[in-house]
Image (cartoon, rainbow, N blue to C red):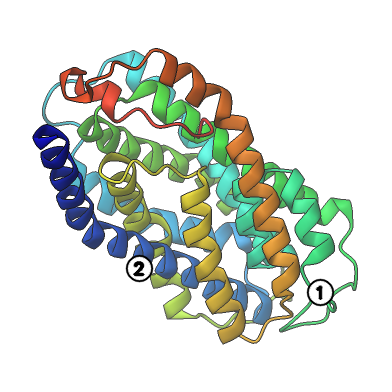
Amino acid sequence: MEGDWWFVVVVEGGERRQNPLRIIHIIGNFMRIWSIYSMYYYLCQSEASVVLFIFTCLVPSSIIFLSVQKPWRGRPLSNTQVVPAMINGAITALYFILWVKGVKSCGPLRAILAEYSGAVLGVLSGVLYGRRGHVWKKREKVLGMKEMAVPMLAGILSAFRRVITRRVSIKNQLKRRLHAITIASATCFMFPVAMWDIILRTTPDSSKEYPISLWSYISTIVFGVILIFYIENIAEERLHMVFSSPKHLMVAGGCIVVLEIFYKMDFSLAGFIICCAILGFGIYEATSLERTKRDTHQAPDLSEEPFEDQIHMSSLPT
């Protein structure tokens, strides 16, 4: 009995120590989603190029990541680590382009949910989301499959690039160094696309100047690319919460509700709750087999297990 009482005290103490990390995780996700709404507002109000916008955000982000992580220092990285990170950069570049296009065409709510669910919830959110389908500029009343396919594909690429990251890097420090290479590689892959976009937009009679929203760029760089990476690392390593998990979805859902109300979007709370409930149930069912398999092989005493087994998380491969 005394041993059980001591175990309960230790668990409760650990839960209290994790509360500040949970608050940081919630604030970080809120700021990231806020940056998405700011980006959506800017892209809808202006005729700025999606490719140039995300390329302009990736250039300083890659410089900051390389300056902070310094992947060329420390233990040399092998080709089996660097090459997949560079390939992941190409996937990341395509993901950013498609995802930002999805945000502009379908709205932030659909794009964010598509990042979690891929195709399934993207269709449901398109049906249950709202009544008018536009806020800041005129749109079609009903989005077609062509518009919805963009954020769906971006969500699939998001999951794919996270799988590559998990397969290549296990240790947290190594993951940060490889992520700097990935973002730099994504910037390089996007460079010719951005230059081609500039050439296409540069015509003899093109003298129109596009407005620049400094907050949209800064918030996307700081909160949407840089800060969210470290916050997700904290959530994964300390809170055992990965991107494709019901808890993570619940945090994002709460932030979305607040911002949808703040921006006075065409928001159906009932439809959004239904979408999140379906997605959360799907994630839970998809990971139930993995949890059962883990529990059957789990030792009775967790304190004697290796550290890697204790932090093994049951979630979709992201």
Measured along the vertical axis of the image, is residue 9 above or below residue 272? above
SS assignment at label 1: loop
Measured along the vertical axis of the image, is residue 283 above or below residue 27? above
Q: For this rendering, which residue is in front, 207 or 81?
A: 81
Residue 68 appearing in the image: yes
Q: For this rendering, which residue is in front, 242 or 314?
A: 314
Q: Position of residue 179 (x, y in %)?
A: 34, 38
67 relative to 133 in the view: left or right: left
Q: For this rendering, which residue is in front, 100 or 127?
A: 127
The tag on residue 133 is: 1
The residue depicted at 14 percent of the width and 34 percent of the height is: 1
- CA gap between label 2 and label 1 equals 28 Å
Q: Position of residue 303 (x, y in %)?
A: 16, 24
Q: Position of residue 137 (x, y in %)?
A: 76, 82
Q: Label 1: how many residues lie within 10 Å, few (<14), some (14-19) or many (20+)?
A: some
The residue depicted at 55 percent of the width and 78 percent of the height is: 259
23 relative to 313 in the view: left or right: left
Residue matched to label 2? 27
| Residue that sits furthest to the front in the current view | 1
